[in-house]
Amino acid sequence: MLEVYKNGVYNVAASDGTDDDAGLFHHRKRVRSLSPVISFSVNGFRGQTVRVVESKIWERHLEAAHLYSRGWVLQERLLAPWFIHFTRNQLFWECRELSACESMAHGQYSWVGKLIDTPQYASVSYHSRNKTRSIQNPFDQHGCGNIWHDVVYKYSVAQLTFWEDRVIAIAGLARHLKEVYNDDYCAGIWRRDIHWRLTWHSGTGGVRLQTLLQPNDSQANIRIPSWSWLSIAKSEICLSFSARSRSRKRWKVC
């Protein structure tokens, strides 16, 4: 799956389709092609302008779409260089530099590109969970380590038809990032910051993955260490952020 999606031209998604019979198009509400620009004056400054956009437009129309509740889709979306989303009310499109939609055509920085591409984007902003952050170092406390935090959270709340796919449904993304980050992937956690990422926690309702596997499952004998967040299913997972994360010289992973 890694080579298929990474080397594709365009990935086209029927994002609001509930099954494989759903098409791309829906009867939709009228959408403004561009967000309105309003001019105003404040504190003696004239000619100030702002662009008015819908609050949480990505969360409401894209992230909440049915397709993105599926676990396999996360790595497909992140690995594809260009992605076109047909949602119920408008088109969204993403590439490594920009995320945009019909009503917000000027777009915003894409956090996808900052995760997938080589981490040589010093001080480049990206959007994630309504916050703009800056990448200084791929494993800096405010860099790509935080982006991996978001990936883990999104993946942990996604659904899988077969729970034995829990590891492999994100394996392609992990193989790619191993080369990008020049680090070892240790069952969902990167070796370089493993000493504080081990302090992840799950929400309520989580169960051990092994209890969901049937004896006749193809990967029923899969071995996932109990210290890995991958060993927990049916619950949101949050990797911990530690103010002490910079004191790595005290730690050595053998």
Image (cartoon, rainbow, N blue to C red):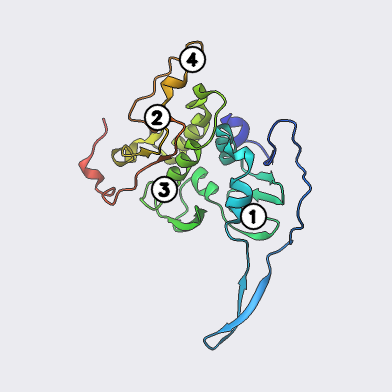
Does residue 236 appear in the picture of this structure? yes
Label 3 to label 4, Cα distance in Å? 34 Å
Residue wearing tag 4: 214
Q: Which residue is mark 1?
A: 100
Q: Circles 3 and 2: CB distance less than 8 Å?
A: no
At label 2, which amino acid type do we have? Ala
Q: Residues within 10 Å of mark 4 (few under 14, many from 20)?
A: few
Q: Report which quarter residue 186 is drawn in.
A: top left
State how many labels appear.
Answer: 4
Q: Which residue is mark 2?
A: 187
Q: Secondary structure at mark 3?
A: helix
Residue depicted at x 42% and y 33%:
205
Question: In percent of the image, x 61 and y 43: which residue is there?
Answer: 81
Of residues 77 and 205, the one nearer the viewer is 205
Q: Which mark is residue 146?
A: 3
Residue 116 horizontal/vertical position (percent): 52, 43
First in sequence, mark 3 or 4: give its number.
Answer: 3
Question: Which mark sits nearer the N-terminus, 4 or 1?
Answer: 1
Residue 165's x, y, as percent?
52, 24
Nearer the observer: mark 3 or 4; the answer is: 4
Q: Are marks 2 and 4 in contact (CB under 8 Å)?
A: no
The location of residue 214, given as percent across then percent down, is: 48, 15
Q: Residue furthest bottom?
A: 44
Dot 1 lies on which element?
strand
